[in-house]
Amino acid sequence: KPSPTEQNLRPILEIKDITKEFEAFTAVNKVNLTLYEGEIFALLGSSGCGKSTLLRMLAGFETPTSGSILLDGEELIGVPPYKRPVNMMFQSYALFPYMTVKQNIAFGLKQEHLPKSQIEERVEKMLHLVHMEDYVDRKPFQLSGGQRQRVALARSLAKEPRVLLLDEPMGALDKKLREQMRLELVDIINSVGVTCLMVTHDQEEAMTMADRIAIMDRGQFVQIGGPREIYENPNCRFCAEFIGSVNLFDCTLISSNATQSLLRADDFTHLIELQHDIDLADGMPLTIALRPEKIYISHEKPEEETNWCHGVVENIAYLGDISIYYVKLKDGRIVTSTLPNVDRFKQGLPTWDDQVYLSWDAESCIALTI
Ligand code: ATP
């Protein structure tokens, strides 16, 4: 997808230098973010990195220590949660157990004292949106996990918030249902056009659902970008390792010009040729990241002088769609290479204990300086 600015989307929410300290501990540290109208944005990070605290500040359940949150240009800090045009859907869904599906969806609208006919109309619309028309009179305990999630979503959308906050939206569902619900949730969110900020620690969920992702670490954003950008161009070691799997080689720079460099990997003797558009200074510590699917595996020695190494197949993991080859280099380190299993009928694929050559294209090398 093109970026929000390429799509000419309007900024709707601006978070400026937001910080939250809990006594001596800084949970969120000077975070800046602009959300654009209609986008789905995911906060991704490991446990304790500050994702939920950030979300809770937007909802109004937590007061920032400093910074500002502008929604359509208006400051949100100081506005009580129920008066914010923002709604949060919790991981536990927080449905009222003694209320029916219909009553749950209508709850927030009744609190706003909307006319009865308008409440009826809005509830009907929401029931239709989440395909729950046939379950209006059921109570939450009479619903499946996925149905409960749909009701929770309908309830958070009923008040037509400007921004929808989702805290681990699939957290309560099992793996199979999570996968099914991802696209359904995206469809519903997109059909109403609401801007959505979701928190997850599941990278696959972030990659399939979000237009843009922020990777968070210790209260700060480390990288913001589309799923492909973050995977293909991680800006640091942390992001490269956080998303997908990766082989990392610490290197020493041998020679360099504006677009190409020659490197020696510290733990094996072969040379790495790198294409880049960043300035590399002599002596700069450099790590090369290589995704496993970018590494070819073969019995044949490559003709080139660079971008290959030699090892022994130590293990092969069969994962259905792909197989992961674990290749041990002379110094003992393991490099992984993945092959799609559609190639499995090909003759001469390496097997256990085979001597193999791993090779890659110069443009597959990602240079990391931090
Ligand atoms: P998880 O994925 O486990 O929910 P998270 O990224 O959402 O993690 P937060 O809940 O935002 O993490 O918490 C960030 C940090 O702030 C954690 O170290 C947590 O212990 C701390 N923290 C959160 N709330 C409070 C509080 N009320 N008082 C003190 N520390 C807190």
Image (tube, rainbow, N blue to C red):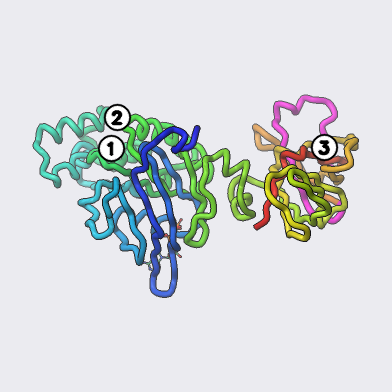
Q: Earlier in the sequence, mark 2 or mark 3?
A: 2
Residue 38 in percent (x, y) is at 37, 36
Q: Cα distance, mark 1 to mark 2?
A: 8 Å
Q: Cα distance, mark 2 to mark 3?
A: 51 Å
> Height in image: 332 above or below 181?
below
Q: Earlier in the sequence, mark 1 or mark 3?
A: 1
Residue 34 in percent (x, y) is at 40, 47
Q: Cα distance, mark 1 to mark 3?
A: 52 Å
Circles 1 and 2: CB atoms closer than 8 Å = yes
Residue 124 in percent (x, y) is at 20, 30
Residue 158 in percent (x, y) is at 24, 38
Question: What's the amino acid at mark 3?
Answer: Thr
* Residue 72 in sight here: yes
Would you say the beta carbon of the disc 1 residue lies within 8 angstroms of ligand 1?
no
Q: Is residue 34 left or right of residue 287?
A: left
Question: What's the amino acid at mark 1?
Answer: Ala
Would you say the beta carbon of the disc 3 residue lies within 8 angstroms of ligand 1?
no
Identify the residue shown where x is 34% and y is 58%. 68
The mark lying in front, picked from 2 and 3, is 2
Identify the residue shown where x is 29% and y is 42%. 162
> Height in image: 290 above or below 183?
below
Please state the extent of the stretch shown in magenta in the rendering: 330-353
Query: Label 2 neighbourhood size at 10 Å, few (<14), some (14-19), many (20+)?
Result: some
Query: Dot 2: what SS?
Result: helix
Identify the residue shown where x is 69% and y is 46%. 366
Task: Classify the position of ligand 1 by quadrant: top left, top right, bottom left or bottom right.
Answer: bottom left
Residue at numbered disc 2: 129
Q: Nearer the viewer, residue 266 or 353?
A: 266
> Height in image: 337 above or below 94?
above
